[in-house]
Image: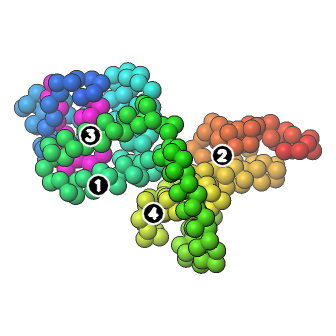
Amino acid sequence: MKWITREKPKIDRIACPWLIKRFVDDTAEFIFCAPGEVITQSIKLKAIPFDVPGVEYTHYNDKCTFDFIISKHKIADPALKILAPIVRGADTDKHNLASQSSGLWAISAGLAYNIKDDYELLKQGMIVYDGLYSWAKYLIKEKHTQNPVDSIFLDVYKTYISKKQKGKKTPEWVGELKAIIQDQIDTNLSLTGISKELELNPSYLSREFSRYFDDLSFGEYIRKLRIDKAKELIQKDKYSLTEIAYLTGFSDQSHFTRVFKQVTGKNPSQFKKQWMMGLSV
């Protein structure tokens, strides 16, 4: 079967062909064309259009085309559950969805910069996704420092870095970032958006964030602050749990309840009840 999409692929338009070839149709043929020609050419060539607006194989809500193909074709491979948020995070600039998303974006952007022919780019990109899939399926629990020699080097490196950073001035962007987070904690914060505001590379900010924010990733730190704020609002006893969910930046009460329990071990109702009874929470 023929499949057709927009030219100049980067994330979804390489990840989807890989997914189709490996799990849906191993004889699939892919065609790239100008964005405005995809629909007309799909009819002319009898090809399935994908990753363009208004077709079946496209983005839905916060999910990308890669997610849709997995759902549409009922692909149950556990490794794809690991890959999906990585691809989605890279494709939608939500690098907080998976720590590997920023790396996938960097590699994809670099390949697209170096390779101008879309079909050669797809060929090389398929290799990247084969490697990412093998990592997700077989190697996800392995670390580079499993080798004793590597561990020794890492220990030496950490010791050296800790000595170097004693007395090292905290970068100016750290203070600016803390102010942004404090002011916008109840909004839909994204590492990519903040990177643009601070004029920093997203990959650099993602890598350096934990060094200055309690050894937590961006997503972990934001969740911690939101739950801390939620605790304060619950103890004020002025707002409903639905209102608190909204005031602390959660999409809905069920999301708020789920994250609150992950962080505290209790759901918000239990926390509120114990606090009102004067028990330790």
Q: Split into 4 quadrants, where in the image is the C terminus?
A: top right
Which residue position is annotated with label 3? 127
Locate residue 203, reporting x and y percent: 43, 59
Q: Amino acid at mark 2?
A: Ala
Q: Tell me if residue 189 comes above or below residue 257 in the rendering.
A: below
Q: What segment carries the magenta color?
A: 1-20
Residue drawn at x 23%, y 53% is 112
Q: Tell me if residue 137 comes above or below residue 174 in the rendering.
A: above
User: For the residues marked 3 and 2, what is the alpha-carbon distance in whole angstroms?
Assistant: 43 Å
Which residue position is annotated with label 1? 109
Residue drawn at x 37%, y 34% is 133
Name the N-terminal-most of marks 3 and 4.
3
Residue drawn at x 82%, y 53% is 236
User: For the residues marked 1 and 4, what is the alpha-carbon distance in whole angstroms?
Assistant: 15 Å
Q: Split into 4 quadrants, where in the image is the N terminus?
A: top left
Q: Amino acid at mark 3?
A: Ile
Which residue position is annotated with label 4? 204
User: For the residues marked 2 and 1, what is the alpha-carbon distance in whole angstroms?
Assistant: 36 Å
Mark toward the viewer: 2 or 1 = 1
Q: Residues within 10 Å of mark 3 (few under 14, many from 20)?
A: few
Q: Tell me if residue 52 comes above or below residue 177 in the rendering.
A: above
Which residue position is annotated with label 2? 245
Name the N-terminal-most of marks 2 and 4.
4
